[in-house]
Amino acid sequence: MNGASWADQWDNSGTAVVRSGGGGTASNSNTAKYKEKFGHGVDKTKAVASSGFKKLKAGSAVGFRWVKDKYHKTTNKH
């Protein structure tokens, strides 16, 4: 079993025992580092998704306008 034992987890004496499984400030800094990287990744993903949505919206508007114009031209012929 890696990590602290049950007795070490519930010990109120103030002395921390760190086993070979990690823990302590090293894992906290790693966690903070990964959270920061994850946050930057999410920001990039949002930016790319927003940009893609704007392109899709513009392209769809042009396409629908083209179809509307073609339909309008064919129905106005007498």
Image (cartoon, grey):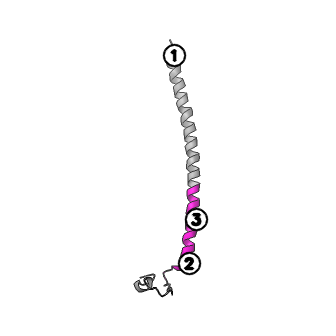
User: Could you tell me which residue is drawn at 42 percent across and 84 percent down?
Assistant: 5
For numbered disc 1, what is the local secondary structure? loop
Residue for badge 2: 25
Location of residue 60 with respect to 76 vertically, above or below? below
Callout 3 touching callout 1 (CB < 8 Å): no
From this view, report whether residue 57 is shown above or below residue 18: above
Start and end of the magenta stretch? 19-43
53 in magenta = no
Alpha-carbon span between mark 3 and mark 1: 60 Å
Q: Residues within 10 Å of mark 1 (few under 14, many from 20)?
A: few
* Residue that appears at 55% across and 39% down: 57
| Residue at which label 3 appears | 36
- Foreground residue, 54 or 25? 25
Which residue does the image show at 57% across and 59% down from the upper left? Answer: 41
Q: Amino acid at mark 2?
A: Thr
SS label for mark 2: helix
Q: Amino acid at mark 3?
A: Glu
Q: What secondary structure is the magenta-colored segment mainly?
A: helix
Q: Residue at x 56, y 72 (%)?
A: 30
Q: Which residue is mark 1?
A: 76
Compute the Cα span from label 2 to label 3. 16 Å
**Residue 17 at x, y percent in the picture:** 49, 86
In the rendering, at what x and y percent does residue 45 appear? 56, 54
Spatial CA distance of label 2 from label 1 is 75 Å
* Residue situated in front as seen by the camera: 75 or 23: 23
Which residue type carries mark 1? Asn
Instruction: Decide: few, some or many residues near mark 3? Use Cα within 10 Å; few <14, some 14-19, many ≥20.
Output: few
Camera-side mark, 3 or 1: 3
Image coordinates for residue 18, horizontal then vertical, percent: 50, 84
